[in-house]
Image: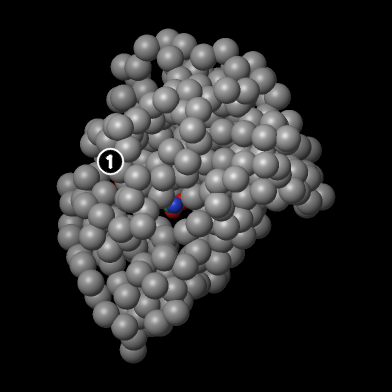
Amino acid sequence: MSSSLDSGWFTEVFDSHGSAFSLKVTEKLHEVQSPYQHLEVYATETFGNLMVLDGCVMLTDRDNFLYHEMIAHPALFTHADPKRVVIIGGGDCGTLREVLRHPGVEKVTQIDIDEEVTRAAERFFPALTESNDDPRAELLFADGVKWVDEAADDSVDVLIIDSTDPVGPAEGLFKTDFLRRCHRILRAGGVMVQQSESPLYHSGSIIRELRRDMGEAGFGSVATLPFPQPVYPSGWWSVTLAGKTCDVTTFREADAGQHGLSLEYYTAEAHRGALALPPFMRRLLED
Ligand code: SAM
Protein backbone atom coordinates (compact mmCIF):
# COMPACT_ATOMS: atom_id res chain seq x y z
CA MET A 1 0.00 0.00 0.00
CA SER A 2 1.34 3.46 -0.83
CA SER A 3 -0.13 6.92 -1.30
CA SER A 4 0.70 10.14 -3.11
CA LEU A 5 -0.51 13.68 -3.56
CA ASP A 6 -0.38 14.80 -7.15
CA SER A 7 -1.95 17.95 -8.63
CA GLY A 8 -4.56 18.11 -5.88
CA TRP A 9 -5.48 14.41 -5.91
CA PHE A 10 -4.86 12.12 -2.92
CA THR A 11 -4.25 8.62 -4.22
CA GLU A 12 -4.01 5.35 -2.26
CA VAL A 13 -2.38 2.63 -4.33
CA PHE A 14 -3.22 -1.03 -3.65
CA ASP A 15 -0.07 -2.49 -5.17
CA SER A 16 -0.90 -6.14 -4.61
CA HIS A 17 -4.25 -5.71 -6.40
CA GLY A 18 -3.06 -3.45 -9.22
CA SER A 19 -5.62 -0.79 -8.34
CA ALA A 20 -5.87 2.63 -6.69
CA PHE A 21 -8.41 5.06 -5.26
CA SER A 22 -8.22 8.86 -5.60
CA LEU A 23 -10.04 11.83 -4.08
CA LYS A 24 -9.70 15.43 -5.19
CA VAL A 25 -8.40 17.35 -2.17
CA THR A 26 -8.59 21.08 -1.61
CA GLU A 27 -6.43 21.48 1.51
CA LYS A 28 -4.29 19.57 4.01
CA LEU A 29 -5.89 20.34 7.39
CA HIS A 30 -3.66 18.37 9.76
CA GLU A 31 -0.58 16.14 9.88
CA VAL A 32 1.08 14.47 12.86
CA GLN A 33 3.47 11.57 13.40
CA SER A 34 2.28 9.77 16.54
CA PRO A 35 4.38 7.06 18.23
CA TYR A 36 2.24 4.52 16.31
CA GLN A 37 1.35 5.94 12.89
CA HIS A 38 1.36 8.88 10.51
CA LEU A 39 -1.97 10.72 10.59
CA GLU A 40 -3.21 13.19 7.96
CA VAL A 41 -6.54 14.99 7.50
CA TYR A 42 -7.54 16.58 4.18
CA ALA A 43 -10.52 18.59 2.99
CA THR A 44 -11.85 17.02 -0.22
CA GLU A 45 -13.96 18.49 -2.96
CA THR A 46 -16.89 16.04 -2.73
CA PHE A 47 -16.39 13.66 0.26
CA GLY A 48 -16.01 16.19 3.10
CA ASN A 49 -13.01 15.66 5.37
CA LEU A 50 -10.75 12.64 4.87
CA MET A 51 -8.62 10.89 7.53
CA VAL A 52 -5.56 8.93 6.42
CA LEU A 53 -3.39 6.68 8.63
CA ASP A 54 -0.01 5.53 7.29
CA GLY A 55 -1.16 6.38 3.76
CA CYS A 56 -4.39 4.33 4.06
CA VAL A 57 -7.80 5.98 3.82
CA MET A 58 -9.61 5.54 7.16
CA LEU A 59 -12.79 7.50 6.69
CA THR A 60 -14.54 10.42 5.04
CA ASP A 61 -17.49 12.50 6.18
CA ARG A 62 -19.55 11.30 3.24
CA ASP A 63 -19.48 7.53 3.52
CA ASN A 64 -18.31 6.54 7.04
CA PHE A 65 -21.92 5.78 8.07
CA LEU A 66 -21.79 2.58 6.01
CA TYR A 67 -18.86 1.12 7.95
CA HIS A 68 -19.84 2.41 11.37
CA GLU A 69 -23.43 1.20 11.17
CA MET A 70 -22.42 -2.22 9.82
CA ILE A 71 -19.71 -2.88 12.41
CA ALA A 72 -22.04 -1.94 15.27
CA HIS A 73 -25.69 -2.80 14.63
CA PRO A 74 -25.54 -6.37 13.22
CA ALA A 75 -23.58 -7.50 16.31
CA LEU A 76 -25.84 -5.61 18.72
CA PHE A 77 -29.02 -7.01 17.12
CA THR A 78 -27.50 -10.52 17.10
CA HIS A 79 -26.82 -10.54 20.85
CA ALA A 80 -29.99 -11.30 22.87
CA ASP A 81 -29.56 -8.40 25.32
CA PRO A 82 -26.26 -6.47 25.02
CA LYS A 83 -25.39 -4.45 28.12
CA ARG A 84 -21.56 -4.42 28.28
CA VAL A 85 -19.74 -3.51 25.06
CA VAL A 86 -16.00 -3.14 24.35
CA ILE A 87 -14.49 -1.54 21.22
CA ILE A 88 -10.84 -2.21 20.37
CA GLY A 89 -9.49 0.50 18.04
CA GLY A 90 -12.26 2.75 16.72
CA GLY A 91 -10.41 5.93 17.79
CA ASP A 92 -12.47 8.12 15.44
CA CYS A 93 -15.43 7.31 17.78
CA GLY A 94 -17.94 6.67 14.96
CA THR A 95 -18.53 3.09 16.14
CA LEU A 96 -18.89 4.28 19.73
CA ARG A 97 -21.61 6.72 18.65
CA GLU A 98 -23.54 3.87 16.95
CA VAL A 99 -23.28 1.58 20.00
CA LEU A 100 -24.51 4.33 22.30
CA ARG A 101 -27.70 4.66 20.22
CA HIS A 102 -28.85 1.38 21.87
CA PRO A 103 -30.69 2.32 25.07
CA GLY A 104 -30.14 -1.12 26.63
CA VAL A 105 -26.33 -0.75 26.54
CA GLU A 106 -25.12 0.11 30.04
CA LYS A 107 -21.38 0.61 29.48
CA VAL A 108 -19.05 0.90 26.46
CA THR A 109 -15.27 0.96 26.81
CA GLN A 110 -13.22 1.98 23.77
CA ILE A 111 -9.52 1.14 23.77
CA ASP A 112 -7.50 2.75 20.97
CA ILE A 113 -3.72 2.65 21.00
CA ASP A 114 -3.42 6.17 19.56
CA GLU A 115 -4.90 9.23 21.30
CA GLU A 116 -4.00 11.40 18.28
CA VAL A 117 -6.77 9.70 16.26
CA THR A 118 -9.44 10.72 18.77
CA ARG A 119 -8.07 14.25 19.11
CA ALA A 120 -8.13 14.64 15.29
CA ALA A 121 -11.68 13.25 15.13
CA GLU A 122 -12.82 15.77 17.76
CA ARG A 123 -11.44 18.63 15.64
CA PHE A 124 -12.20 17.50 12.10
CA PHE A 125 -15.08 14.97 12.45
CA PRO A 126 -17.10 16.44 15.34
CA ALA A 127 -20.29 14.55 14.38
CA LEU A 128 -18.51 11.25 15.15
CA THR A 129 -17.48 12.31 18.63
CA GLU A 130 -20.78 13.95 19.62
CA SER A 131 -21.69 11.09 22.02
CA ASN A 132 -18.32 10.95 23.80
CA ASP A 133 -19.72 12.70 26.87
CA ASP A 134 -22.39 10.03 27.34
CA PRO A 135 -21.92 8.78 30.93
CA ARG A 136 -21.96 5.18 29.63
CA ALA A 137 -18.82 5.80 27.51
CA GLU A 138 -15.26 5.20 28.71
CA LEU A 139 -12.33 6.12 26.44
CA LEU A 140 -8.94 4.52 27.11
CA PHE A 141 -5.70 4.92 25.16
CA ALA A 142 -3.78 1.65 25.33
CA ASP A 143 -2.87 -1.43 23.32
CA GLY A 144 -6.05 -3.45 22.75
CA VAL A 145 -4.13 -6.73 22.77
CA LYS A 146 -2.83 -6.05 26.28
CA TRP A 147 -6.24 -4.77 27.49
CA VAL A 148 -7.96 -7.96 26.36
CA ASP A 149 -5.17 -10.02 27.97
CA GLU A 150 -5.85 -8.42 31.33
CA ALA A 151 -9.67 -8.34 31.15
CA ALA A 152 -11.72 -10.63 33.40
CA ASP A 153 -13.24 -13.88 32.10
CA ASP A 154 -16.93 -13.75 31.08
CA SER A 155 -17.21 -9.98 31.40
CA VAL A 156 -18.28 -8.64 27.96
CA ASP A 157 -21.46 -9.09 25.86
CA VAL A 158 -20.30 -7.59 22.55
CA LEU A 159 -16.65 -7.13 21.56
CA ILE A 160 -15.99 -4.97 18.48
CA ILE A 161 -12.58 -4.99 16.77
CA ASP A 162 -12.57 -1.75 14.75
CA SER A 163 -8.94 -1.80 13.74
CA THR A 164 -6.65 -0.71 10.96
CA ASP A 165 -5.42 -3.32 8.44
CA PRO A 166 -3.57 -6.36 9.86
CA VAL A 167 -0.12 -4.73 9.70
CA GLY A 168 1.74 -2.46 12.15
CA PRO A 169 0.01 -1.90 15.52
CA ALA A 170 -3.09 -3.90 14.44
CA GLU A 171 -1.20 -7.07 13.44
CA GLY A 172 -1.77 -8.71 16.83
CA LEU A 173 -5.54 -8.15 16.55
CA PHE A 174 -5.76 -10.77 13.78
CA LYS A 175 -3.87 -13.59 15.58
CA THR A 176 -5.49 -16.79 16.88
CA ASP A 177 -4.10 -16.21 20.39
CA PHE A 178 -5.86 -12.84 20.53
CA LEU A 179 -9.11 -14.41 19.30
CA ARG A 180 -8.85 -17.06 22.05
CA ARG A 181 -8.58 -14.29 24.64
CA CYS A 182 -11.56 -12.51 23.07
CA HIS A 183 -13.52 -15.76 23.45
CA ARG A 184 -12.43 -16.00 27.10
CA ILE A 185 -13.64 -12.50 28.07
CA LEU A 186 -17.06 -12.88 26.38
CA ARG A 187 -19.99 -14.01 28.48
CA ALA A 188 -22.14 -16.95 27.34
CA GLY A 189 -24.19 -15.66 24.40
CA GLY A 190 -21.45 -13.12 23.67
CA VAL A 191 -20.74 -11.87 20.15
CA MET A 192 -17.50 -10.58 18.68
CA VAL A 193 -17.25 -8.66 15.41
CA GLN A 194 -14.11 -7.76 13.49
CA GLN A 195 -13.62 -5.55 10.44
CA SER A 196 -12.48 -8.10 7.89
CA GLU A 197 -11.29 -6.29 4.75
CA SER A 198 -12.52 -6.58 1.13
CA PRO A 199 -14.84 -9.42 0.03
CA LEU A 200 -13.42 -9.14 -3.49
CA TYR A 201 -9.73 -8.99 -2.60
CA HIS A 202 -9.56 -10.95 0.64
CA SER A 203 -12.26 -13.68 0.71
CA GLY A 204 -9.72 -16.38 -0.19
CA SER A 205 -7.08 -15.07 2.23
CA ILE A 206 -7.61 -12.74 5.23
CA ILE A 207 -11.37 -13.40 5.67
CA ARG A 208 -11.04 -17.15 5.18
CA GLU A 209 -8.15 -17.32 7.67
CA LEU A 210 -9.97 -15.12 10.21
CA ARG A 211 -13.03 -17.41 10.08
CA ARG A 212 -10.86 -20.50 10.52
CA ASP A 213 -8.97 -18.85 13.41
CA MET A 214 -12.27 -17.84 15.07
CA GLY A 215 -13.35 -21.49 14.89
CA GLU A 216 -10.01 -22.61 16.38
CA ALA A 217 -10.41 -20.01 19.14
CA GLY A 218 -13.65 -21.75 20.23
CA PHE A 219 -16.37 -19.76 18.48
CA GLY A 220 -19.16 -22.09 17.37
CA SER A 221 -20.75 -19.84 14.77
CA VAL A 222 -19.26 -17.39 12.25
CA ALA A 223 -20.85 -15.05 9.64
CA THR A 224 -19.26 -12.57 7.24
CA LEU A 225 -21.40 -9.61 6.17
CA PRO A 226 -20.34 -7.63 3.07
CA PHE A 227 -21.43 -4.03 2.52
CA PRO A 228 -20.48 -1.15 0.18
CA GLN A 229 -17.64 1.17 1.19
CA PRO A 230 -16.61 3.42 -1.71
CA VAL A 231 -13.34 4.71 -0.20
CA TYR A 232 -11.82 1.34 0.78
CA PRO A 233 -9.90 -0.99 -1.57
CA SER A 234 -12.33 -2.45 -4.18
CA GLY A 235 -15.17 -0.20 -2.88
CA TRP A 236 -16.57 -3.13 -0.90
CA TRP A 237 -15.86 -4.15 2.70
CA SER A 238 -16.90 -6.73 5.30
CA VAL A 239 -17.32 -7.47 8.97
CA THR A 240 -17.10 -10.98 10.42
CA LEU A 241 -19.22 -11.93 13.44
CA ALA A 242 -18.47 -14.83 15.77
CA GLY A 243 -20.75 -16.22 18.51
CA LYS A 244 -19.50 -17.80 21.74
CA THR A 245 -22.63 -19.87 22.22
CA CYS A 246 -25.14 -18.10 20.00
CA ASP A 247 -25.87 -18.50 16.28
CA VAL A 248 -24.67 -15.35 14.49
CA THR A 249 -26.49 -16.30 11.28
CA THR A 250 -29.76 -15.22 12.94
CA PHE A 251 -30.64 -11.98 14.70
CA ARG A 252 -33.45 -10.16 16.56
CA GLU A 253 -35.26 -9.35 13.33
CA ALA A 254 -38.38 -7.89 14.97
CA ASP A 255 -36.29 -5.51 17.12
CA ALA A 256 -34.06 -4.58 14.17
CA GLY A 257 -37.17 -3.98 12.05
CA GLN A 258 -38.48 -1.31 14.41
CA HIS A 259 -35.28 0.07 15.89
CA GLY A 260 -36.20 3.76 15.44
CA LEU A 261 -32.52 4.70 15.71
CA SER A 262 -32.48 7.16 12.75
CA LEU A 263 -29.83 5.32 10.76
CA GLU A 264 -28.74 5.82 7.15
CA TYR A 265 -27.96 2.25 6.03
CA TYR A 266 -28.72 -0.47 8.58
CA THR A 267 -32.17 -2.04 8.47
CA ALA A 268 -33.40 -5.57 9.24
CA GLU A 269 -33.59 -6.13 5.47
CA ALA A 270 -30.01 -4.92 4.92
CA HIS A 271 -28.86 -7.27 7.72
CA ARG A 272 -30.73 -10.24 6.24
CA GLY A 273 -29.41 -9.41 2.77
CA ALA A 274 -25.81 -9.17 4.00
CA LEU A 275 -26.13 -12.65 5.56
CA ALA A 276 -26.99 -14.08 2.10
CA LEU A 277 -23.43 -14.57 0.85
CA PRO A 278 -22.86 -14.42 -2.91
CA PRO A 279 -21.77 -17.76 -4.41
CA PHE A 280 -18.18 -16.65 -5.11
CA MET A 281 -17.69 -15.75 -1.42
CA ARG A 282 -19.33 -18.95 -0.27
CA ARG A 283 -16.92 -20.91 -2.49
CA LEU A 284 -13.83 -19.03 -1.29
CA LEU A 285 -14.82 -19.02 2.37
CA GLU A 286 -16.40 -22.43 2.83
CA ASP A 287 -14.76 -24.87 0.36
N1 SAM B 1 -12.48 2.06 9.60
C1 SAM B 1 -11.11 1.83 9.60
C2 SAM B 1 -10.61 0.81 8.62
O1 SAM B 1 -11.18 -0.28 8.52
O2 SAM B 1 -9.66 1.10 7.90
C3 SAM B 1 -10.61 1.64 10.98
C4 SAM B 1 -10.72 2.95 11.67
S1 SAM B 1 -10.09 3.13 13.23
C5 SAM B 1 -9.49 4.76 13.02
C6 SAM B 1 -8.73 2.06 13.44
C7 SAM B 1 -8.02 2.31 14.76
O3 SAM B 1 -7.38 1.11 15.20
C8 SAM B 1 -6.92 3.38 14.70
O4 SAM B 1 -7.36 4.52 15.39
C9 SAM B 1 -5.71 2.72 15.36
O5 SAM B 1 -5.02 3.59 16.23
C10 SAM B 1 -6.37 1.56 16.10
N2 SAM B 1 -5.48 0.44 16.45
C11 SAM B 1 -4.58 -0.20 15.66
N3 SAM B 1 -3.94 -1.15 16.36
C12 SAM B 1 -4.45 -1.12 17.63
C13 SAM B 1 -4.19 -1.86 18.83
N4 SAM B 1 -3.26 -2.84 18.86
N5 SAM B 1 -4.91 -1.54 19.95
C14 SAM B 1 -5.85 -0.56 19.93
N6 SAM B 1 -6.12 0.17 18.83
C15 SAM B 1 -5.44 -0.10 17.69
Question: Does residue 172 appear in this view?
Answer: no
Residue lying farthest to the right in this orientation: 279
The residue carrying mark 1 is 133
Picture residue at 36% right of the left edge, 57% below the top: 127
Picture residue at 62% right of the left edge, 23% below the top: 80
- Side of 215 where 231 appears, left or right: left
- Side of 215 where 99 appears, left or right: left
Question: Does residue 123 appear in this view?
Answer: yes
Picture residue at 31% right of the left edge, 58% below the top: 126
Q: Position of residue 124 (x, y in %)?
A: 28, 63
Residue 31, compared with residue 108, is above or below; it is below
Q: Position of residue 260 (x, y in %)?
A: 60, 45
Image quarter (top left, top right, bottom left or bottom right) of the N terminus: bottom left
Question: Crowding at label 1, few (<14), some or many (≥20) Cα neighbours within 10 Å?
Answer: few
Q: Position of residue 91 (x, y in %)?
A: 32, 46
Residue lying farthest to the bottom in this orientation: 7
- Side of 62 where 35 appears, left or right: left
Q: Name the residue nearer the viewer: 233 or 92.
A: 92
Picture residue at 22% right of the left edge, 45% below the top: 115
Q: Position of residue 113 (x, y in %)?
A: 27, 39
Q: Helix, strand or loop at disc 1? A: loop
Q: Name the residue nearer the viewer: 68 or 103.
A: 103
Residue 110, compared with residue 39, is above or below; it is above
Residue 278, compared with residue 141, is above or below; it is below
